[in-house]
Image (cartoon, helix red, strand yellow):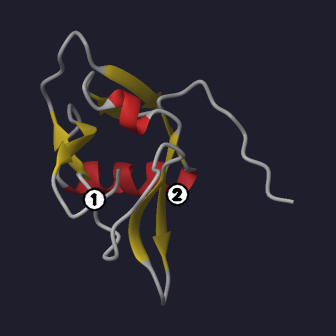
Amino acid sequence: MDIKIKSSRVVLATDSAVSKLKELKDAENADQSFLRMGVKPGGCSGLSYEMFFDTEKSENDFTEQYGDVAIVVDNQSVDHIRGATLDYKEGLNETGFSIDNPNVSRTCGCGNSFS
């Protein structure tokens, strides 16, 4: 039986995701930046994720700290992302970041948008 553990964090990042984010920050000499994670209108299902390194925070942002890596979610996206897990996989069939989001009720056929 697969049991999901509830977390009080807005975004739960796996060790693999944190390690890759740290590697990317180090490669860019971006010590002061953080990963901004949010949603924006778009795609066939209505919303799509956006993730990028940023240096500007708003007072309404939610921040999750993982050692030297911070993940920031804006106030408008938090209800769509709360409880999601950010992972990084590297293998023959799949390489890159993935988001497992319990708030998603429907995804499009291409897998790039959700509602």
* Left/right of residue 42 with respect to residue 19 in the rendered view: left
Asked if 57 appears above or below 29 in the picture, the reply is above
Picture residue at 72% right of the left edge, 46% below the top: 4
Residue on which disc 1 sits: 45
Name the spot of residue 48 as percent of width and height, x first. Answer: 25, 53
* Left/right of residue 109 with respect to residue 93 in the rendered view: left
Picture residue at 45% right of the left edge, 50% below the top: 104
* Left/right of residue 68 with respect to residue 76 in the rendered view: right
Q: Quadrant of residue 54?
A: top left
Badge 1 amino acid: Ser
* Left/right of residue 85 with respect to residue 30 in the rendered view: right
Asked if 30 appears above or below 65 in the picture, the reply is below
Residue that protrudes farthest toward the top in the picture? 59
Residue on which disc 2 sits: 16
Name the spot of residue 75 as percent of width and height, x first. Answer: 27, 21
Name the spot of residue 3 as percent of width and height, x first. Answer: 79, 50
Residue that protrudes farthest toward the left in the picture? 56
